[in-house]
Image (tube, grey):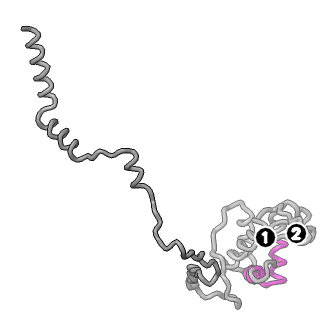
Amino acid sequence: MLGGFAAFAVLGFVVAYIGPTGFALAQATAEEAPQVSLYASSLDDVQSLSGDGSAEAEPAALDRGGYSVYVKPKPTPTVAPTAASSSSSGGWRPPFVTPDPGTAQAIAYDMVLARGWGDDQFACLVALWKKESGWRVNAYNAGSGAYGIPQALPGSKMATAGADWETNPATQITWGLGYIGGRYGTPCGAWDHSQRTGWY
């Protein structure tokens, strides 16, 4: 009796586990999936070329006339209008920036004002000497021999402003402003010349 009960329990478990839904899904899958052999599936992958075997295909022409190249044009830059400049050349002038106290630029600012030049002239001077020496008292150009903040050529010319011309920014600036005033009239005159020629 125990053996019959066990067989009945196993059968009940299988029916409950698979159930009517599981049986229907298994039956539908078996009906939909055709049997495909490896040989049959490889036949579907074979490519064939149909055409006239007697006509020989001409190779594509690879001359320059068969191609065209399109180069996207670069946009033309638009120049923002600037305020009218006092120089005859009409070039760009740097804006004024107040120097930090105790720097070579602060020394130069006081000297520029003492000569009667304004903030616009100081701005030109800052840009000019930034380009020439980075406002470094020991800036040296090995190619030309120019030295100091104003890049005097040779540097020993600055001895006319003081014996400490090699290390004192005030001495170098005094000489540089005298040179600029005598040759170009103003720092902006020197800046304009530098912009046109690359030197002053």
Q: Residue furthest front?
A: 54
Q: Please provide percent x and percent y for residue 185.
A: 78, 84
**Residue under numbered circle 1:** 132
Q: Quadrant of residue 101?
A: bottom right
**Amino acid tagged 2:** Ala
Q: Which residue is mark 2?
A: 146
Q: Where is residue 15 shown, x and y percent of the image?
A: 12, 28
Q: Assess whether mark 1 and mark 2 are in contact (beta carbons under 8 angstroms).
A: yes
Q: Amino acid at mark 1?
A: Glu
Q: Is disc 2 placed on a helix, strand or loop?
A: loop
Q: Is residue 53 above or below residue 42?
A: below
Horizontal arrangement in the rendering, residue 188 relative to residue 68 (left or right): right
Q: Is residue 159 left or right of residue 1?
A: right
Label 2 environment density (alpha carbons within 10 Å; few <14, some 14–19, many ≥20): some
Q: Is residue 141 above or below residue 199?
A: above
Numbered badge on residue 142: none
Q: Which residues are magenta?
A: 173-194
